[in-house]
Every structure is written in structure tokens, then in C-alpha cells.
Image: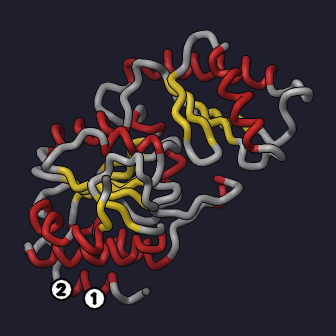
Amino acid sequence: MSLLFFDHGAARLREIVRPGMLCAFDFDGTLAPIVKDPQRAAIPAAVLRRMTVLSEHARVAIISGRGAADVSLRLDFLPEFVIGNHGIEGLPGWEDKASRYHALCLEWERQLKHAVTDRTLFDGGIWIENKNYSLSVHYRLARNRAAAESRLLQLFTELSPTAHVVAGKCVFNLLPVDAPDKGMALARLCETSGAPSAIYVGDDATDENVFRMGRQDWLTVRIERSCDSAAEFYIHHRLDMVQLLDALIGQLASTGTVPAAGVAKAARIR
């Protein structure tokens, strides 16, 4: 079971923070609040200031369910790596399968759009988002979310070709069955970059693929406690990201990675 980071994580943070480490984050629900319209998602100023400092002095990776271009436009800082579509897009060699993944998504989209027009089963609150290499089926705006969730799950079993379905917060993510996940993506980034350790922060079921790796050279943090989570630590709320980033930047400063001026810059906006 996960432990509260601010009560139990200080020693592990000191252990994991080393020069050259990789600082990796999910986007929606982690750096940015989840909103009804995903196109309006934005990083709050206090988090953005700290992420800017972090990216200037350490290796930063964003591993998001969004497309890589979409998430890049929302960052206002320059991470070393931007991985999209839950780990599919942006890894070395992913282009070899891109056209096949794209074709799969088009076929799933065609089948789903036809099915959800049946108003005896679905209301108008279902929204299908094609991210080129994965699909997200949103039901946050459905009048009866429980009914929408149940009917969508049944619908997904009827898709051809078969999709790997990962549940999120009022959303289902449909991915190719042989696609890499976020855990595989982070492992590949650490391998190719030579990072000696990593921290990863996420909030959703897709982030559990990272948490379940159980690597001792990774520190994993989940936003909001979950009894089923494999994350090593949790923080209560996304708003606690400011305090978590301050702790990370402060520990990096103790290794000489972040200069004192950078720490002062991060603290300027609370």
C-alpha cells in the first residue's frame, strides 16, 4: 500500500535524486487539472514556474495520454522528452508501427461512432477523441455515467480488431494490443538516456503501468490515495504538486544540479 509522501518519502527522495536522473510526469490530472473540455487544460502558474526551473537544470520527461504535439503546445517549458499516446508516440522506433496504429484507430472510430448513435443505448454525452495512435472515449458529460460505462465496456468487446482498453477518469483509452505502455516508455527513456534513477508522478490507471514496474531506482508518486495503487507514495491532491516539486528541486539543489538562484525563482510564485 502506498505511503503519504510528505510523511515517509524524504529518505527515498534523498536516495533517488542524483545528477542525470530523469524527472517524469503525466500531464492531465498531474501537472494540469482535469477539465470538462480537454482543449482548455492548462498548467497553473505555480506549477509551471517550478517545472520551468526543473527543465532548465534537470532531465524532464512528459509521458501523456495526449498526442505529443498536443501536450507540447501546453507546456511553456522545454522538457527533454515528450511521449504521447500513453507511451506509443515519441519513443525510438515507434514510427515503424505508426501507420498500422493509425489505421486501427480509424477503424475503431468508425465502428464506435456508428454504435453510439443508437439513442436507445447512448445519450449525446459520449465523445470519441482520435489521437492518431490511440482513441479516448469520454463519457464525463453522459447523463447516466454508470449506464454509459457499462454499455461502452460491452461495446468494446465487439470491436474488430481487438483493442486494449484502459479505464481512466470518465474516459476509456483504446490502444493497440502490442503498443508500449507508460512503464515501458519510462524504462526505454532511462535506458537510452543513461539516467541513473527516475521519479514519476501520475494520477490515473494508465500510470499504474509505471507504478507496477516496482523498480528500486524509481520513486513513484500517485496523486490521490488508492488502495489498489502500486505507487510507492501518494499525495492527497494535485494542488500538493507545488510542495512535491519544491522538495524535488530542493533535493536537486543539494546535489549541485539546481543552483540557489533556481530555487529562489521556483519559490517566487506560491
Q: Crowdedness of circle 1 by 10 Å Cα count: few (<14), some, many (20+)? A: few
Res 60 seen here: no
The residue that disc 1 covers is 264
Name the secondary structure under disc 2: helix
Which residue is pictured at 13% across the width and 57% down the height?
Answer: 20
Vertical order, 214 against 72 (above or below): above
The residue that disc 2 covers is 260
Vertical order, 226 against 95 (above or below): below
Tell me the kind of residue under disc 2: Ala
From the top left corner, tell me how far across and down residue 149 is, in percent. 69, 36
For the residues labelled 2 and 1, say whether their Cβ atoms are less than 8 Å apart.
yes
User: What residue occupies the far top of the structure in this picture?
Assistant: 160
From the top left corner, tell me how far across and down residue 185 is, in percent. 31, 37
Q: Nearer the viewer, residue 96 or 233?
A: 233
Vertical order, 88 against 31 (above or below): above
Which residue is pictured at 43% across the width and 86% down the height?
Answer: 270
Q: Is residue 210 left or right of residue 144?
A: left
Which residue is pictured at 38% across the width and 33% down the height?
Answer: 181
From the top left corner, tell me how far across and down residue 170 is, in percent. 65, 46
Q: Is residue 260 left or right of residue 242?
A: left
Tell me the kind of residue under disc 1: Ala
Q: Is residue 31 left or right of residue 50?
A: right
> For the residues marked 2 and 1, what is the alpha-carbon distance in whole angstroms?
6 Å
Q: Is residue 102 left or right of residue 92?
A: right
Q: Nearer the viewer, residue 193 or 230?
A: 230
Which residue is pictured at 41% across the width and 51% down the height?
Answer: 227
Res 265 seen here: yes
Hey, which quadrant is residue 92 in on the image?
A: top left
Q: Nearer the viewer, residue 123 or 255?
A: 123
Name the secondary structure under disc 1: helix
Instruction: Determine which of the numbered discs, if any, sits on residue 159 in the image.
Output: none
